[in-house]
Amino acid sequence: MSRALFLAPLFLLFSCSHDDCADAPLCENGKATNCERTCSVGPCSTGVNTLDCGDSATCSVVVGDVNSPRFFHSRALCIENGSASCDPGTYGAPVCDGQGLVMGCSGYNHVIRASCSQAGFYFTSSDCCRQSNLGDGGIPDGSTPDGGAPDAGP
């Protein structure tokens, strides 16, 4: 009987699946990790998304604006080094690098770099991502390969 009581908690501990989204948003080793369960304003894709900030940006978790219907979630952002806060309404349109990344003043009022596959979560306008037709480079959406097609919007 005592052996069964000892094993029961271990079974419960190891039988629970880990929620991949539980740790996001997260900045770790120069990488920004965010997770989306749903996506309604494209381009965007669901599941865990990690972006290496590189040498010219620093990862920082930024608290969302509770008054914004779109940018209310906290996010791990790759904020461009040396950039000040910005106003997306006066800053100008984000610019795509042709390699699947977009940079500009985000709805979080910081100049950031983001994946075109996630641009809808960060920018009020991401036309350059839509025009480049890069999709999301085949980044898996929730661990399911998607062939490069975004989940919401082209």
Image (spheres, rainbow, N blue to C red):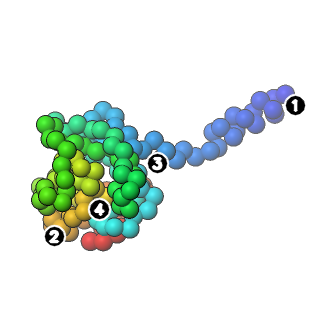
Query: In this view of the protein, can residue 141 be seen by the observer?
Result: no
| Label 4–label 3 contact, CB within 8 A | no
The amino acid sitting under disc 2 is Gln
The amino acid sitting under disc 3 is Cys
> Which quarter shows the N terminus?
top right
Name the mark nearer the viewer: 4 or 2.
Answer: 4
Alpha carbon distance from label 4 to label 1: 56 Å
| Label 4–label 1 contact, CB within 8 A | no
Instruction: Identify residue for label 2.
Output: 131
Alpha carbon distance from label 3 to label 1: 38 Å
- Give percent across and percent down for residue 132: 15, 67
Residue at the (34%, 34%) spot, across then down? 28
Q: What secondary structure is found at the residue carrying circle 3? A: loop
Nearest to the observer: residue 108 or residue 12: 108
| Label 3–label 1 contact, CB within 8 A | no
> Which quarter shows the C terminus?
bottom left
How many labels, in total? Answer: 4
Q: Residues within 10 Å of mark 4 (few under 14, many from 20)?
A: many
Instruction: Identify residue for label 1.
Output: 1
Alpha carbon distance from label 3 to label 2: 30 Å
Instruction: Identify residue for label 3.
Output: 21
